[in-house]
């Protein structure tokens, strides 16, 4: 259905025409419970309260800054009918195109069109909070993408994803529709599942495995203990002095964009235990990942079979009454792995955090010498190989490892509260950091190295962009103490 649209005043024609396309981004909706087929609609400009400012820089590039439009939006879903206020910045390109985008908010409501030249709006509750980006071609056609979420009313927490196209023609021509494909998705769901809290004091579903059969599992006092003793064994590989409890009763899978977090409380580890290692894997693929925590380091390991170390960092943190967390976020064909050590409790402080990305390529790993420099343990580590990361599995392990000279006493680690958490919105990792700056004269490039002391050993720091993982350094000040992803 077409609705008469009054002419607006102010602004430049292309700037106005570009922003009117935003209205039709809001015209199609889907059932609340799940996404379904897209639909189409049309929207109309009803006012330009802030025409914006045209700016030209020294290179002759022209921008439109601070433009604001008010749009009447009608849709076949009442949740998307309403009044939209769209703020926009636009940059004109030398080839006649324009790049534009900004923030928009649409108040849900109804329109009275008894007087088509003076439509009246009545709010009914809730608003869409949105961000959009678009490209306007020289021939007047547009392509725009928009994402947002609902606040209040019947749309609270819902997510909106849309793409629209406009055909060629005059930007303000009301006869040219803006066609949209749109999806309303349910609010993100975060879940928490207790795999085993060990309160029944029974080894239900748990099996034991150890090098040379010297491992034991004990569940008592509402806690889970892994023990191993290897008298006379000299450790030359990770398989020589290793014990674990494992279960296959929990299958898991990660959809694209989802995050799984495995958590377990580490109550204590003995001085004779070199590494504690919660591990998740797939028996069918012989592939898994783990957070490996020693007395003075934290590592992220991959089993293929054969162990590879994807990350290892020295860290002096306590090893009693902390939470060990391994987070896995799928980003298309990549898997972002994050190892964290946390204070107990839902809002426990982060004591350590590090992320790496496992890609289908052979990713960098630590050598035997590099691992020995960081940990004092000389072990033969494998290199990574090509292959898809692990997006599903069926094994859970709680493991211990002892770097043994043949004389060490029994190694033990005590665990509690093994949980699986699922997130659709990824968590923001906040770490202690230092910002390094230095002059960069033309023709001179510097590499950054770091060491535990001024005497070394010095190791190269690779600050590279990781596929599937975005990172940002921000200053620490009173104005920026809380962060979120939107």
Image (cartoon, rainbow, N blue to C red):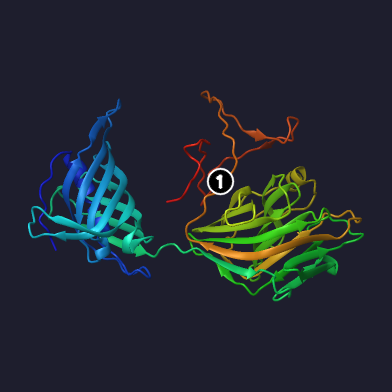
Rendering coords of residue 177 (x, y %): 18, 57
Q: Position of residue 402 (x, y in %)?
A: 81, 57
Left or right: where 374 falls relative to 254 = right
Comparing 262 with 25, the one in front is 262
Residue under the point 32% across and 58% down: 162
Circle 1 is placed at which residue position?
430
Residue most extreme to the top:
441
Task: Name the foreground residue: 153 vs 166.
Answer: 153
Q: Position of residue 39 (x, y in %)?
A: 26, 65
The answer to whether residue 410 is visible is yes
- The image quadrant where one finds the N terminus is bottom left
| Nearer to us in this view, 353 or 270 | 270
Residue 31 image-quadrant placement: bottom left
Horizontally, is 116 left or right of 242 in the view? left
The percent position of residue 155, horizontal first and vertical second, equals 33, 62
Per the image, label 1 sits on a secondary structure element best described as loop
Image side of residue 223 versus residue 44, left or right: right
Graded by Cα atoms within 10 Å as few (under 14), some (14 to 19) or many (20 or more), the crowding at tag 1 reads: some
The residue depicted at 30 percent of the width and 56 percent of the height is 127
On the question of residue 385 being in view, the answer is no
Residue 187 sits above or below residue 432 on the image: below
Asked whether 352 or 327 is in front, the reply is 352
Looking at the image, residue 56 sits to the left or right of residue 394; the answer is left
| Residue 430 sits above or below residue 64 on the image | below
Identity of the residue drawn at 84% across and 69% down: 213
């Amino acid at each position: 259905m077409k609705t008469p649209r009054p002419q607006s005043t102010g602004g430049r024609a292309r700037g106005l025409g570009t922003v009117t396309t935003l209205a039709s981004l809001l015209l199609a909706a889907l059932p609340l419970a799940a996404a379904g087929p897209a639909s189409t609609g049309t929207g109309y400009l009803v006012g330009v309260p802030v025409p914006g400012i045209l700016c030209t820089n020294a290179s002759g590039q022209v921008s439109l800054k601070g433009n604001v439009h008010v749009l009447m939006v009608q849709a076949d879903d009442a949740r998307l009918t309403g009044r939209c206020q769209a703020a926009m910045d636009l940059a004109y390109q030398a080839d006649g195109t324009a790049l534009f985008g900004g923030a928009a908010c649409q108040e849900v409501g109804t329109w009275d069109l008894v007087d088509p030249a003076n439509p009246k709006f009545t709010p009914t509750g809730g608003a869409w909070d949105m961000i959009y980006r678009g490209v306007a071609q020289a021939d007047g056609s547009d392509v725009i993408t928009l994402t947002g979420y609902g606040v209040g009313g019947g749309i609270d927490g819902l997510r909106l994803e849309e793409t629209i196209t406009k055909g060629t023609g005059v930007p303000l021509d009301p006869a040219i529709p803006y066609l949209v494909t749109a999806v309303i998705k349910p609010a993100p769901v975060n879940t928490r599942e207790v795999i085993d809290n060990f309160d029944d004091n029974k080894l239900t579903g748990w099996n034991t495995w150890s090098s040379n059969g010297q491992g034991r599992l004990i569940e008592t006092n509402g806690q889970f203990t892994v023990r191993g003793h290897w008298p006379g064994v000299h450790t030359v590989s990770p398989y020589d002095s290793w014990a674990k409890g494992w279960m296959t009763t929990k299958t898991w899978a990660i959809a694209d964009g989802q995050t799984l977090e495995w958590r377990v409380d580490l109550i204590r580890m003995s001085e004779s235990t070199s590494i504690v290692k919660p591990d998740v894997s797939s028996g069918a693929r012989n592939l898994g990942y783990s957070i490996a925590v020693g007395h003075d380091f934290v590592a992220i390991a991959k089993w293929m079979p054969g162990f590879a170390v994807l990350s290892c960092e020295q860290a002096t943190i306590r090893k009693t009454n902390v939470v060990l967390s391994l987070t896995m976020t799928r980003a298309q064909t990549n898997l972002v792995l994050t190892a964290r050590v946390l204070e107990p409790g839902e809002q426990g402080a982060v004591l350590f955090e590090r992320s790496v990305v496992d890609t289908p390529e052979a990713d960098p790993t630590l050598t035997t010498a590099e691992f020995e420099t960081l940990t004092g343990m000389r072990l033969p580590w494998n290199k990574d190989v090509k292959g898809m990361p692990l997006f599903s599995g069926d094994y859970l392990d709680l493991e211990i490892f002892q770097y043994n000279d043949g004389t060490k006493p029994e190694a033990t680690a005590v665990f509690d509260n093994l949980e699986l958490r699922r997130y659709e919105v990824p968590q923001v990792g906040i770490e202690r950091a230092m910002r390094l700056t230095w002059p960069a004269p033309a023709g001179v490039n510097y590499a950054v190295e770091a060491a535990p002391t001024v005497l070394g050993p010095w190791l190269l720091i690779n600050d590279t962009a990781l596929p599937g993982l975005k990172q940002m350094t921000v200053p620490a000040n009173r104005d920026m103490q809380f962060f979120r992803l939107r």
